[in-house]
Amino acid sequence: VSTPAVNFFNMTFQNGTSTDGGGIDVVCNAGSSLNLSVKGSIFSGNIVPMNGGAVRIRECVDSGFSFSRTSFNNNTTKTGSGGAIYMM
């Protein structure tokens, strides 16, 4: 069984709002896996009330996550954790 892959290249995630994960919010089904790659991207000014100002990744097992040549600027969470990245 192959692991699904999601790739973002040269993207800007700016001024996003959500309950969790202002730029990207990944929730895998229990026991599932995912390969996420973000390259040459910008996360800026994303705001959430809970977790992961820029990115939240939740319930992914046996997964791979890569962030390269990517900047995180002024991403915030009001009451939760992970201004830039939150993984659970």
Image (tube, rainbow, N blue to C red):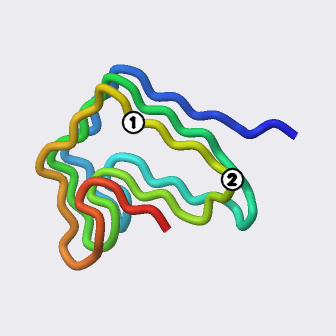
- Residue 36, compared with residue 61, is above or below; it is above
Give the crowd class for mark 1: few <14, some 14-19, many >=20 residues within 10 Å: few
- Residue 73, compared with residue 84, is above or below; it is above
List the single residue furthest toward the right.
Answer: 1
User: Where residue 35 sits: x, y (%)?
Assistant: 61, 39
**Who is closer to the viewer here, 83 or 15?**
83
Residue 30 lies left or right of residue 77; in this view the side is right
User: Where residue 67 sits: x, y (%)?
Assistant: 39, 36
Tell me the number on the disc at residue 62.
2
Residue found at x 24% / y 40%: 43
Upstream in sequence: badge 1 or badge 2: 2
User: Where residue 83 sits: x, y (%)?
Assistant: 23, 60
User: Where residue 32 sits: x, y (%)?
Assistant: 73, 56
Determine which residue is flagged by label 1.
67
Residue found at x 18% / y 53%: 75
Residue 45 lies left or right of residue 85; in this view the side is left
Residue found at x 21% / y 59%: 47
Q: Amino acid at mark 2?
A: Asp
Q: Amino acid at mark 1?
A: Phe
Measure the C-alpha gap from mark 1 to mark 2.
17 Å
- Residue 31, compared with residue 10, is above or below; it is below
**Secondary structure at numbered mark 2:** loop
Residue found at x 34% / y 55%: 85
In the rendered image, the quadrant that contains the N terminus is top right
Image quarter of residue 29? bottom right
**Secondary structure at numbered mark 1:** strand
Image quarter of residue 22? bottom left
